């Protein structure tokens, strides 16, 4: 262990690991809350055509070509792709359900 080699006591190493885990969780929560608070994204996700497109693309990424000319769909897919990349880089997996809210009340609940 690198920490032990540097003279870090085991108890301190455990605390540092816990701190790092909490920092990662806070970073993920902050990142996801930005999307939950994104009114344009949330409004777009309430549209039937956008949800259908998202379902199709989730089923097979190749379906994205069908929607390339729809700016509303592509905006949602691009934002979600950015979120997925962020999460993948940090070892998290999320779905559209994790970032979609039914309305202001649910968004407020998730902030707590």
Image: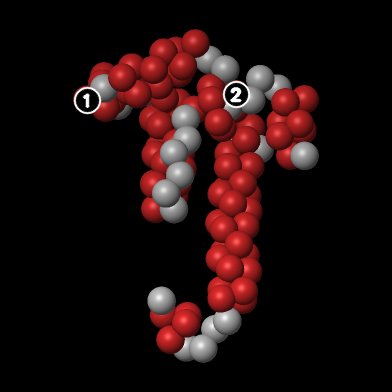
Residue hosting label 2? 43
Q: Residue at x 47, y 88 (%)?
A: 6
Image quadrant where residue 69 sits:
top left
In percent of width and height, residue 45 lies at 53, 22
In percent of width and height, residue 4 lies at 47, 82
Q: Nearest the camera: 74 or 104?
A: 104
| Residue 36 against residue 31 in the figure, above or below | above
- In the picture, the quarter occupied by the N terminus is bottom left
Instruction: Name, please, the residue furthest toward the front.
Output: 10
Q: Label for residue 62?
A: 1
Residue 9 visible to an observer of this rendering: yes
Callout 1 secondary element: helix
**Residue 34 shown left or right of residue 94 in the figure:** right
Mark 1 vs mark 2: give the one in front: 1
Q: Which residue is drawn at 45% across and 44% down?
A: 92
| Residue 12 against residue 27 in the figure, above or below | below
Q: Label for residue 29?
A: none
Residue 67 visible to an observer of this rendering: no
| Residue 43 against residue 48 in the figure, above or below | below
**Disc nearer the start of the sequence (1/2):** 2
In percent of width and height, residue 98 lies at 55, 31
- In the picture, the quarter occupied by the C terminus is top right
In percent of width and height, residue 102 lies at 66, 20
Q: Which residue is drawn at 44% across and 39% down?
A: 93
């Amino acid at each position: 262990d690198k920490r032990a080699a540097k003279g870090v006591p085991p108890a301190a190493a455990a605390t540092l690991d816990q701190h790092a885990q909490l920092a990662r969780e806070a970073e993920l929560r902050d990142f996801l809350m930005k999307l939950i608070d994104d009114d344009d994204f949330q409004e777009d996700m309430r549209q039937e055509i956008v949800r259908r497109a998202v379902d199709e693309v989730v089923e097979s990424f190749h379906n994205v070509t069908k929607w390339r000319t729809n700016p509303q769909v592509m905006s949602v897919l691009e934002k979600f792709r950015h979120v997925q990349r962020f999460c993948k880089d940090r070892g998290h997996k999320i779905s559209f359900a994790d970032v979609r809210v039914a309305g202001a009340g649910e968004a407020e609940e998730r902030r707590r």
